[in-house]
Image (cartoon, helix red, strand yellow):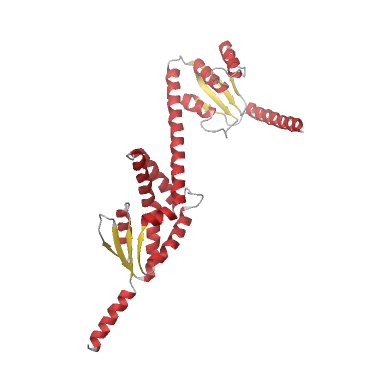
Amino acid sequence: MSAHRQFAIGFAMEGLVNVHRLTVTATYAFPGLVGSLQQLAGVKVLLGDMATQSLTCTFQPQIAQEVAATIAHHLLTDWLRAEIAREGSRRTGGFESDTAICVDQIVAKFAAGKLSLADIAFSTWLRRIQVELLPFCSGDAIISLDGFARFRLREVVAALRDEIDRVWQDDGRERDFERLVAGLREVLREQVMHDEELHVFTTPDFVWIADADGFSLDDDALEEAMDAALADRDGIDSEDLAIASLIAHSPRRVVLHDLYPRAVWPSFAETVSCLFQERVQRCDGCEVCRQLAHMEQRFRIQWTQNHRRHQR
């Protein structure tokens, strides 16, 4: 063999030694990974048997970290979406479009750093998975993404399921609230609007309705209903009674004095605002509000002191 031919063979073998080869298999979420790898400069992607979802990519050692980061990003986005879809289809026989939209929104927030899963941010997960993938990108290797992800990302998948359930519950409560307000609006439309102004004061402990002169509403029917509420009959509470009274009076203007802005949604103030819409004007801190807030604070301090005294 001539010296020239030996040099050519040696050069070719050296080139092969310096090229890493990674074969990846996955059951689903594959097209996205193919596209992401093909966008990396210096990576050659050879598609294998698409029936078994496999590909082989070759690349120089200096871009091994980029390849690992690309696969890690794919696992934390496309793979997660596909995994939840697979679980949904297995449990219910299908995956509803509303659920798919919900999953897409949550994963997008996660990838944008606006949401943590398992109390860990996306960037941290990305670095962690990249480090664990790097050994597979440092020579000739075969990796099953499904097996790798279901072991390494089991906390992420569980946290994503919990977040989906939470969002669905919140959405359900919001839909119920919207239906409630829509029904109340229908009742309000049937009432004759009165040219009067009512002031609604809401605090952590009570709701008080007064006219423009500051006098509490004198409503015998309301007082009877209030007695029933205090006796816990028929599941009626003071907020229900206040809403019923406001609808019955149907005032042209409602001034809302919200002394409980941290109330759990949907708060009474939120209900009044959504129900009366353009008729509502929010108080920006009047003298009555300041006095009520002071009285409320004094009441709570006194109650706390008495409570502690009784526990001694």
Front one among 6 and 167: 6
Q: Residue at x 55, y 25 (%)?
A: 255
Where is residue 308? Give x, y as percent. 74, 33
Locate the C terminus and report the quarter of the image it occupies: top right
Residue 212 in view, yes or no: no
Q: Quarter of the image for the N terminus: give it.
A: bottom left
Report x, y in % for residue 307: 72, 31
Q: Is residue 119 left or right of residue 26?
A: right
Left or right, residue 97 beside residue 262? left
Q: Is residue 55 above or below residue 154?
A: below
Q: Position of residue 30 (x, y in %)?
A: 31, 54
The foreground one among 147 and 294 is 147
- Report the number of discs: 0
Q: Nearer the viewer, residue 217 or 281?
A: 217
Residue found 37% across the figure and 63% down from its top: 67
Expressed as whole percent of the image width and height from the top left, the position of residue 242 reads 55, 20
Q: Residue at x 50, y 27 (%)?
A: 271
Q: Quadrant of residue 185?
A: top left
The image shows residue 83, relative to residue 130, as above or below, that is above
Q: Is residue 216 above or below residue 259?
A: above
Quarter assignment of residue 239: top right
| Residue 223 seen in render | yes
